Image: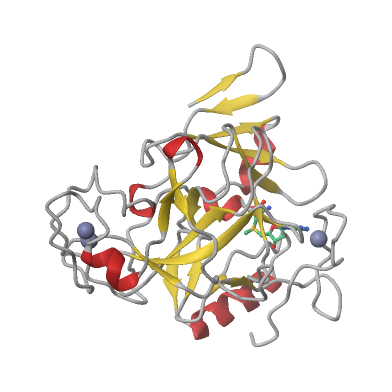
Amino acid sequence: MSVKSALSNEFIVDDISNGLEPSPVCLVYNDDKELEELRVHQKPSHGNEIVTNEESSSYYDGCDCADNCISEDCGCKSTHGYFYTSQHSNQRGLNLNFPVSTSIFECNLSCTCTTTVCPNRIVQHGINIPLQVFKTRDGRGWGLRTLQKIYKGMFVCEYAGEIIKTEEAKRRWEEMNNNAIARNYVLCLKEHNIDPIHIGNAGRYINHSCAPNLQIYLVRINSLIPVAAFFAVRDIEIGEELTFDYSGADDHCGQSGAMIDGIEDKKGMKKCLCGSEICKGMLPFDQSL
Ligand SMILES: C[S@@+](CC[C@H](N)C(=O)[O-])C[C@H]1O[C@@H](n2cnc3c(N)ncnc32)[C@H](O)[C@@H]1O
Ligand SMILES: [Zn+2]
Ligand SMILES: [Zn+2]
Ligand SMILES: [Zn+2]
């Protein structure tokens, strides 16, 4: 349902996730025509007809903590790492000293701890920060911004979508190249690719910036297929647009997921409109595809 704002000419859709996330993802728009570009929103269950994935049990060993993983003895933390630490106002966030290539392990279905209490479960709870999809006014299409201050290390949302193999990603990329709008959504990871073009979540609206405020880390929970999760690399103010570097690179020259892009000129590069002082001028382009 959409409601017209009393203060401006904007229409507001309260929650495009339809209650699928703990915190609503709202959307503001000015003109019904803008909605034509908008696609179906639904948090996908991992696995689809292309790569199947059984989630009734975990692929990873669990801990047998009786104290809900509060102590240092937690088997999950001592085996894989102490990824989440107490940060601003005692909220737990990712310790960003880990290289981006590190897999983060959360407690899983094999663990004895209580899902709602264990501090080693963050990404698996979904979006906990009120977010807003809005139309950028500089030609980048839709974007995503936060309606709450986000502190460095906090989890924001995952990049959810269909899990596809590289051959399928190539086929879809060529199909996209023939399309007039030609926005790209395929995120290439080492093990698989994620395409939210048909089914996805708010992560699909995050634009590229050469000076981003988010970084993707791969988080392993119950599935062999890791979750591509966005964490804040610095404090982010209310109303600020959320961005990540589509090349997947971070300050330490590590790499996580990369977004293939680029079609507008013959070199296959697309102009970057991020507006940052250190803008490289073009969107990252993966020539392997
Ligand atoms: C994952 S989508 C992001 C959401 C997109 N803006 C939309 O309207 O759905 C990636 C596409 O957004 C656009 N985009 C993202 N960041 C951009 C930037 N810094 N400069 C220009 N276009 C950008 C490009 O068209 C790119 O293919
Ligand atoms: Zn534990
Ligand atoms: Zn555990
Ligand atoms: Zn840029």
* x and y, in percent, of residue 43 in the image: 39, 51
* x and y, in percent, of residue 123 in the image: 39, 53
At 58% from the left and 32% from the top, the residue drawn is 147
Residue at far top of view: 6
Ligand 4 found in image quarter: bottom right
Asked if 116 appears above or below 120 in the picture, the reply is above
Colouring of the image: secondary structure
Q: How many marks?
A: 0
Quadrant containing the C terminus in the rendered view: bottom right
Q: Is residue 49 found left or right of 231 in the rendered image?
A: left
* x and y, in percent, of residue 46 in the image: 34, 64
Quadrant in the rendering for residue 177 = bottom right
Q: Is residue 89 found left or right of 249 in the rendered image?
A: left
Q: Is residue 36 found left or right of 90 in the rendered image?
A: right
- Judging depth in this view, the residue of 5 and 159 nearest the camera is 159
At 33% from the left and 53% from the top, the residue drawn is 124
At 75% from the left and 57% from the top, the residue drawn is 211
Decide if residue 160 is in sight here. Answer: yes
* x and y, in percent, of residue 31 in the image: 70, 31
Asked if 47 appears above or below 84 in the picture, the reply is below
Quadrant in the rendering for residue 246 = bottom right
- Judging depth in this view, the residue of 190 and 103 nearest the camera is 103
Decide if residue 108 is in sight here. Answer: no
Asked if 36 appears above or below 245 in the picture, the reply is above
At 83% from the left and 68% from the top, the residue drawn is 282
Quadrant in the rendering for residue 278 = bottom right
